[in-house]
Structure formats: C-alpha cells, structure tokens
Image (spheres, rainbow, N blue to C red):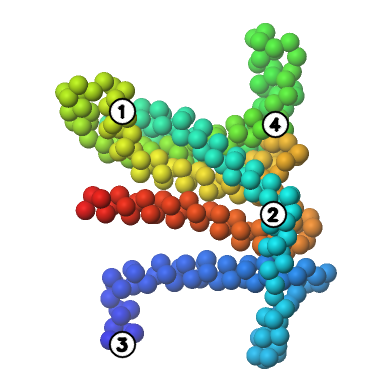
Amino acid sequence: MSARQIFTRPARIAVVVPYLWMAAFFLVPFGFVLKIALSQTAIAQPPYVPVFDLAAGWEAVKAAAAQLSIDNFKLLASDDLYILSYGRSLFVAIVSTAILLLSAFPVAYGMSKLPQRWQPLAMMLVIIPFWTSFLIRIYAWVNILQHDGLLNKMLLALGLIGKPLVWLSTDSAMYLGIVYSYFPFMILPLYATLSKMDDTLLEAAADLGCSRISAFWLVTFPLSLPGIGAGALLCFIPIVGEFVIPDLLAGSDRMMIGQTLWLEFFTNKDWPVASAIAIVLLALLLVPLLVYEKLQRSHLEGDA
C-alpha cells in the first residue's frame, strides 16, 4: 500500500494526526530543552555551550555532542534548594488537591441533583470566573488580603478582631488563591461523572437496607472515581508548577519549583540548570499520569 493510499483514508488520517501533533509540539521542543539541560552555562548568546552548528559538518556536530554532560542533573540532586523546592511543590499540590476535592464534591453532587432546567445555570455560574483574566483575579485577592484590605475592614467592622491580621504573604493566602483558581477544574469532571449516574441504583441500595451514608460509599463514591481521578489530575499537575499564585500571595521564605525555575531562567540567566529543572519536573508529573492510565486500563479490562 502506497503512502498516498494511506493518507487518503480519513480513518488513517485521524490516527496519524495526533502523533504528528505530539511530535511537532512536544517531542521537538522537548529535544531542544533536553539538549540545553545537557549543556554548560556560558556568558554568550545563547547563554550555553556547546551550540550545534549543522552547517559546520558532521564532525563538528559529533564534537559538540561529546561536550554534553549530566552535571546539571547532578547539581539538582545535590543542592537542597532544588530538592526542597520540588518537595514543597509536591506537598502544596497534594494538600491543595485534597482541599479542592473535599470542597468541590458536595457542589458537583448538588449540581447533579438539581432539576434538569437549572443545571445549565449552575454550570454557567461555575464557568463565569473563566471569563476574567487569571492574573486580575489573583491581584484582586492581593487587595482583599492586604493589611488594610477588604477582609480586615470587614472583620474590624464586625468586631471580630481588634487589629488587622496578617493574611497576605502566608501559606494560608496561597492555598486560598489556589483553591479559588482551580475550583472549576475539579467541579467540571466531577459533575460530568455524577450527572450520568443512574438514580435507580440508589433506590435499589435503599431497598436492600443501605442507609444514605452506606449507599454513598458503596454506590455513589465508586461510580464517581473516574471524575475524581480526572479532576485530581487537572488540578495536581498545574499546581505543582504554579508560579503566579505563590509569587503574589505566599511568603518568599520557601519557594515552589515554578519560582525556582523562573529565578534560574530570568534572574540568574542559567538556561542549562533551568532546563534540567523543567526536565525533572516533567518526569515527576508523568508518574501520576501513568498511574491514572494504568488504573483506567484495569477498570476497562475489568468491565470487559
């Protein structure tokens, strides 16, 4: 079969296009970043060596490739700054995802139980925050949480506090900003899963003597696991690399890996180390994706 015959079939094209997309917009940029991560910092333009010069011939390319090393990755493994940044990012992402799940599940469940005519309105109320710039919404929280901000003024007016409290530049403010920003990302997959659940299953569980709590844990929760997994991934992965929220709302004593990456890339101009940070971060984020894929595959095989 000729190449022309393959690409004239729509089904074949539908299979090939995603691979071409991944190659063009993931593998090729990843190759550039990996090459920079294996290079050394230099005061030059670009700020790393060696630089491959394809026009100089194959021997020059081989000589440049021989200069590549894994020293930047060794630095990440030996320096507490990077280890603590990775650890803090993972910890913040885990805690934030747990808070998001606990707070979004009741909302998504309540939305799925609304009358059919009210569910689109509820969905619209969840999506409306996306219509405002992310940066503007975070800056709004800066104004609310600052020393003379709206929150302290309200608490003082109600007599709940005697003097303004410190809210801004704390971990509490950072968690608040993260939960606020990623709340819709957790609700939408949960709602999509819960809205498809057959209510007759709960009626059958009640007929068999299950209480509402038992029916929830034996019926509703297992059926909602796909939505929980999807929502957790949608929140956990971007939170690990979050930069804007920690930079604006959290303190500067401990940085997340996104802030460390920014520092190395734009302040220190150390592109090789910054690229190595990005490569390791990508490797860490592949772990939950692979676990989720394996669980999904086991679930599908079990249903079959």
Quarter of the image holding residue 200? top left
x and y percentages locating residue 49 in the rendered image: 75, 74
Q: Name the residue that disc number 3 marks.
A: 2
Circle 1 or circle 2, nearest the eye: 1
Which mark, by number, is residue 261? 2
Vertical relation: 166 (above or below) 55: above
Amino acid carrying label 3: it is Ser
Amino acid carrying label 2: it is Leu
Residue 122 shown left or right of residue 205 in the figure: right
Q: Considering only order in the chain, which callout, 2 or 4, is on the residue closer to the N terminus? A: 4
Labels 2 and 3 touching (C-beta < 8 A) = no
The crowd level at tag 2 (other Cα within 10 Å; few <14, some 14-19, many 20+) is: many
Disc 2 to disc 3, C-alpha distance: 47 Å
Circle 2 or circle 3, nearest the eye: 2
Q: Is residue 242 visible?
A: no
Disc 4 to disc 2, C-alpha distance: 21 Å
What residue is at 53 percent from the left and 48 percent from the top? 237
Dot 3: what SS? loop
Labels 4 and 3 touching (C-beta < 8 A) = no
Q: Considering only order in the chain, which callout, 3 or 2, is on the residue closer to the N terminus? A: 3
Quarter of the image holding residue 216? top left
Circle 4 or circle 3, nearest the eye: 4
What residue is at 66 percent from the left and 58 percent from the top? 277
Vertical relation: 123 (above or below) 72: above
Amino acid carrying label 4: it is Thr
Which mark, by number, is residue 216? 1
Considering depth in this image, is 33 or 210 the residue closer to the camera? 210
Q: Name the residue that disc number 4 marks.
A: 170
- In the picture, which quadrant includes the N terminus? bottom left
Q: Considering only order in the chain, which callout, 2 or 1, is on the residue closer to the N terminus? A: 1
Amino acid carrying label 1: it is Phe
